[in-house]
Image (cartoon, rainbow, N blue to C red):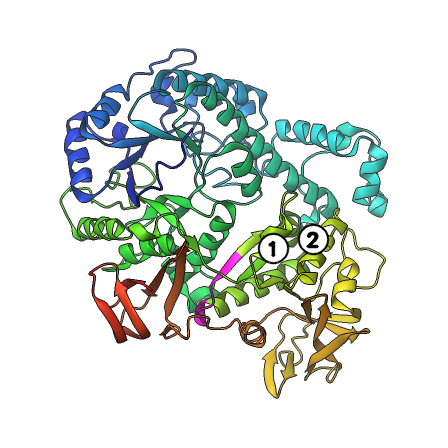
Amino acid sequence: MNTEYLFPAMTVGVCYYPEHWDKSLWEEDLRRMLDSGITVVRIAEFAWSLFERTEGVFTLDYFDPFLDLCEKMGMKVIFGTPTATPPAWLTEKYPETLNCDITGVKYRHGMRRHYNYNSPVYWEKCEIIIGKIARHYGNHPAIIGWQIDNELNCETDEFYSEADSAAFRMWLKERYGTLDKLNDAWGTVFWSQTYTDWAQIFVPRPAPHAAYNPHLHLDYLRFVSRSCLDFCAMQAKILRAHISPDAFITTNGMFGHMDNHAMTRNSLDLYTYDSYPNFAFGLDVKDIEHNLLRDRWSGMKLTEVRSICPHFGIMEQQSGAGSWTSRMDNPMPRPGQMTLWALQSVAHGADFVSFFRWRTCTFGTEIYWHGILGYDNRDNRRMGELRDFAAKMKKLAPVCGADYAADVALVRDYDNIYDSELDNWHRRVTRQSEDALFEASQLHHTPMDMLYLQPYTSLEDLKKYKALFMPHASIMTGEKAGLLESYVRQGGVLIVGCRSGYKDEHGRCVMEPQPGLLKKLTATDVMEYTLASPAEEEPYAIWNGRRMPMPVFNDVLTPLKGAQVLARFGSSYYAGEPALTEHHVGEGRVLHLGGALSREAAAMILEHLGLLEPFAPVVSAPQEVELALREKDAEKVLFALNYQNKAMTITLHQAAQSLFDGRTMQGDVVLAPYEVQVFRL
């Protein structure tokens, strides 16, 4: 198969639902799309009831006229499998296919994603409908790609049906082999939780204070991921048996309790994401901590997407106000924001951007989820922005296939992600540090990647970066510690924070001095540690005479042989004790921070390492402007994105050509509200 279709040129697409509109609109819609620069449409991901209105009675030709029209007019198509929305006959006849809430109450027909992955009946029905669709449409010349399901694990990423408990037991038997090994791994001797029969084990069920066994719950989240990945792999296998070898397979979104990296590696040809930066302005957003960067927080998600698939696509890019009748109240994008957000995706690595949706639906739950066109079908401001963006995409040819350039990476792994959901201390420090690092990287124009440690992660993957932040890897294994040591010995810099290395793979605390398996690298010992007390001032340290906030949790560090103290605590009963150390290991070094990262601490560490403001010789920009670099061979292209509703000025210290209008610029350049400029350096 050929996955390069989307990438030889920057490509613009749109999500379209032929079944929502009278057939008399199809041709005119396609003509307007093509005239505006759209060359790809995604269709059919919610259309199961069109294909199989009643059980076993298939009507597969509904989309034939539309696909033939696309072929005639030169429009390409991404076709979706419809498994996100099972028809009413299926869930009524086979209620065992339905997911449940944690109390066991079944979800019912009328929404979407109300099924469970582990129902044998649902698998069977999905295999049948996917096979029928793939055989019928698989070689249509208009189809260049297939999307599996829609937003796997969206709406819910927890599954509590009887089928899930049965499948969980089977997964545990494969993982542990015997109940004795399972009981040991889960520490079931605590509170008399010992299991003597596999039938006694269930997925989490209601418990006082929702206090489930944390080791069971950790395995449960791993199981949910495995269930989702198996469901995706089943669909990919069927599609590959029947579709054109030139068509790619993808899925969209990025949701919880799922190893997106393994899913992409095992089942997909490329990964696509759904980007909705306007959520940052929603009336139901209560997270005021993120108000500092607002829509720039989408860059955090795009950074994670890039770790999954460096050259990804956007299957759904926000074009209008996003709202259901029941939730998610978001304002209409202001003039320029639709283009800004689309170019944000491109700056972070997207070579394909498909807007959601072509026209706002006039019925159903999403009547307030606005597309490019409104209910009245007239050209509007957003249509003008679409045309402008499509024209810009043509001028971004040098960007196509170019890599996002970053010397710094945030290191993650799924075990610690899942553990941080279950462990209050782990969750608080992780969220604080990851947010602070992203804020510092954005405000100080220091591009950041994410790097997930997977079984196949190599030393070469780590060596791409000058510095790796792995702030709170509570769960640590010998394999990962060994990989990190090799990276440091060959010249890399590793930064770890408090609460590191004190758990094993089951989430149990180890009877070793902290930071456990990382102690050899940090050359530190931790005997005293505490949550920050609300009765005292916010913890801080002093580094070279500068105050450095140390929020949430503090480890008091005891330096061992070879470790140098860089900063000392300035508050609480441990004032004067080491708060930040540095230890040289081979050609590299390890910094151990006895706290969670603050925005100031992240910036000070980057400054200490000589990695802050890497664009300074080329351009100066205010904190309100994001800078991003994509490069391929000798080609370097710099993005400057103004997220403000007022003009911002950047200063180019060398001549640079604007890709949008061809002008050579130097000195002060004024960016209009929400404007993006892209320069060839």
Q: Is residue 227 left or right of residue 56?
A: right
Magenta region, residue range: 442-449
Looking at this rendering, what residue extends furthest in the top direction? 57
Point 58% across, 30% down: residue: 230
State if disc 2 and disc 1 touch (CB < 8 Å): yes
Q: Amino acid at mark 1?
A: Leu
**Quarter of the image containing the C terminus?**
bottom left
Question: Which quarter of the rendering shows the N terminus?
Answer: top left
Which residue is outermost to the front? Answer: 634
User: Left or right: 506 with respect to 238?
Assistant: right
Q: Residue at x 38, y 27 (%)?
A: 246
Q: Earlier in the sequence, mark 1 or mark 2?
A: 1
Question: Does 365 sit left or right of 454 as displayed?
Answer: left
Disc 1 to disc 2, C-alpha distance? 9 Å
Point out residue 471 in the picture as x, y percentages from the top left corner: 64, 63
In the image, is residue 132 above or below residue 109?
Answer: above
Is residue 182 highlighted in magenta? Answer: no
Q: What residue is shown with label 1?
A: 462
Q: Which residue is mark 2?
A: 483
Q: Is residue 446 magenta?
A: yes
Percent across and percent down for residue 14 are: 28, 40
Residue at disc 1, secondary structure: helix
Q: Residue 37: x percent and y percent?
A: 21, 43
Asked where in the image residue 596 lies, by quadrant, the reply is bottom right
Q: Secondary structure at mark 2?
A: helix
Residue 523 showing in the rendered view: yes
